[in-house]
């Protein structure tokens, strides 16, 4: 995870959170290194709350979901977004487990 999660409420009262993931590619680029893709995943209700409660920046999570596209109007221009709608988030490892034990 590339940042901590904030859970907000939509106009309809639904809890929503964006989970930003850094996903390394499985093959090397022309310079011999691995590129990383940054993907936004949107989680709702209990998935959003649980992920916020148990995960933080630097933690490793697995996300099962579906790809969804949408458009957003910004400064009079239409932007096309592609994001993952999280159907399940699995907590794989904490970056700082010793800090969480102290709390």
Image (tube, rainbow, N blue to C red):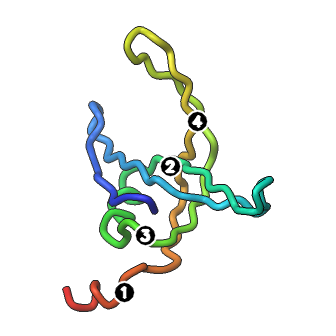
The residue beneath circle 3 is 58
**Helix, strand or loop status at disc 3:** loop
Closer to the N terminus: mark 3 or mark 4? 3
Cα–Cα gap, marks 2 and 1: 24 Å
**Helix, strand or loop status at disc 2:** strand
Cα–Cα gap, marks 2 and 3: 15 Å
Towards the viewer: 14 or 1: 1
Q: Is residue 95 above or below residue 80?
A: below
The residue beneath circle 4 is 82
Closer to the N terminus: mark 1 or mark 3? 3
Q: Is residue 102 above or below residue 54?
A: below
Cα–Cα gap, marks 3 and 4: 23 Å
Residues packed near mark 3 inside 10 Å, few (<14), some (14 to 19) or many (20 plus): some
Can you tell which mark lies on residue 41? 2
Q: How many marks?
A: 4
Closer to the N terminus: mark 2 or mark 1? 2
Task: Please say if the residues under marks 2 and 3 sit with CB atoms less than 8 Å apart.
Answer: no
Cα–Cα gap, marks 1 and 3: 11 Å
Residues packed near mark 2 inside 10 Å, few (<14), some (14 to 19) or many (20 plus): many
Closer to the N terminus: mark 2 or mark 3? 2
Residue 99, quarter of picture: bottom left
The residue beneath circle 1 is 97
């Amino acid at each position: 995870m590339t940042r901590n999660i904030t859970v907000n409420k939509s106009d309809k009262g639904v809890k929503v959170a964006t989970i930003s993931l850094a996903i390394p590619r499985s093959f090397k680029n022309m310079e011999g290194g691995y590129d990383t893709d940054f993907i936004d995943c949107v989680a709702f209700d209990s998935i959003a709350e649980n992920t916020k409660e148990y995960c933080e920046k630097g933690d490793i999570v697995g996300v099962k979901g579906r790809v969804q596209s949408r458009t957003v109007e910004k400064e009079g221009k239409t932007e096309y977004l592609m994001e993952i709608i999280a159907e399940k988030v699995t907590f794989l490892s904490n970056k700082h487990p010793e800090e969480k034990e102290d709390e």
